[in-house]
């Protein structure tokens, strides 16, 4: 069914204007962004297919927005314009969170820090270790990926971590890395690495506030687990 065949109050745009964006389902929001489907498939059906679990779809909004560009090219109905719009939405989300974290203390917005790290790292098919660098007021300076590894591990060098923190004049950091396996559980090696980096950074008076382990849709705080 095309959007024009729906009752007016059920069409995504009219529904959003009348009741607010929170009233729309993920499928309706995506359909509003895509605007058109393709021959034989309306935009709501296209949106439903895109949000379906893998391998048919991308497993929801997060999976779609984090999907590598090459994987989007294979979808009939996602031309360059639609792919560009999806990429723009993901980047707007990253920048909005970055602005929020740069204007208020990260300690006051732990959920935003987790969301920010997820937007940058959770979708990657390889493991990346990164630093979230904070100033003396605990506001975001930058997120800097440092080490890229295989699907199972990354080699992290404390000397480079310390040098990066000093170069940015950071007062504190949040350590972060992704698990491409999809399981955001800290390993024994993650705990040992955290303690090693915490000791190294303490020598230059930089605090380690947390170590976040992320996967698509998941974020585990080692501080909340009592592992720091």
Image (cartoon, rainbow, N blue to C red):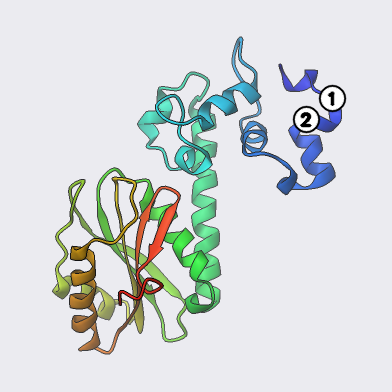
- Residue at x 74% of width, y 44% of height: 23
**Residue 126 percent location from the top left of the image:** 25, 46
Tell me the tag on residue 7: 1
Decide if residue 75 is on the left or right side of residue 180. Answer: right
Whether residues under marks 2 and 1 lie with C-beta atoms below 8 angstroms apart, the answer is yes
Q: Residues within 10 Å of mark 2 (few under 14, many from 20)?
A: some
Q: So how many labels did they put on this image?
A: 2
**Res 206 quadrant in image:** bottom left
**Residue 60 percent location from the top left of the image:** 51, 38
Vertical placement of 99 versus 162: above or below? above
Decide if residue 53 is on the left or right side of residue 89. Answer: left
- Residue at x 36% of width, y 30% of height: 70
Tell me, yes or no, if residue 162 can be seen here.
Answer: no
**Residue 172 percent location from the top left of the image:** 35, 81
The N terminus lies in which quarter of the figure? Answer: top right
**Residue 66 percent location from the top left of the image:** 43, 43
Q: Secondary structure at mark 1?
A: loop
Q: Nearer the viewer, residue 150 or 136?
A: 150
**Res 41 quadrant in image:** top right
Q: Secondary structure at mark 2?
A: loop
- Residue at x 50% of width, y 24% of height: 79
Q: Residues within 10 Å of mark 1 (few under 14, many from 20)?
A: few
Q: Nearer the viewer, residue 149 or 171?
A: 149
Tell me the tag on residue 160: none
**Res 166 quadrant in image:** bottom left
Residue at mark 2 to residue at mark 1: CA–CA distance? 7 Å
The C terminus lies in which quarter of the figure? Answer: bottom left
Tell me, yes or no, if residue 58 can be seen here.
Answer: yes
- Residue at x 21% of width, y 77% of height: 195
Tell me the tag on residue 11: 2
């Amino acid at each position: 069914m095309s959007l024009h065949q729906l009752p007016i109050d059920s069409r995504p745009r009219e529904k959003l204007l009348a009741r607010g964006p929170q009233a729309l389902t993920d499928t309706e929001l995506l359909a509003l962004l895509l605007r058109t489907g393709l021959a034989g498939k309306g935009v709501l059906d296209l949106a439903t297919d895109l949000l379906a679990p893998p391998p048919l779809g991308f497993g929801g909004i997060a999976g779609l927005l984090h999907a590598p560009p090459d994987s989007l090219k294979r979808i009939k109905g996602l031309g360059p314009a639609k792919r560009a719009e999806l990429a723009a939405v993901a980047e707007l989300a990253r920048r909005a969170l970055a602005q929020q974290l740069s204007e208020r203390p990260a300690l006051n917005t732990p959920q935003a820090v987790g969301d920010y790290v997820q937007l940058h790292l959770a979708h990657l098919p390889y493991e990346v270790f990164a630093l979230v660098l904070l100033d003396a007021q605990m506001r975001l300076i930058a997120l800097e990926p440092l080490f890229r590894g295989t699907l199972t591990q990354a080699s992290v060098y404390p000397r480079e971590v310390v040098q990066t923190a000093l170069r940015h004049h950071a007062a504190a950091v949040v350590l972060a890395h992704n698990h491409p396996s999809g399981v955001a559980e800290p390993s024994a090696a993650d705990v040992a690495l955290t303690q090693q980096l915490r000791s190294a950074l303490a020598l230059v008076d930089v605090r380690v506030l947390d170590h976040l382990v992320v996967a698509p849709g998941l974020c585990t705080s080692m501080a909340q687990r009592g592992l720091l």
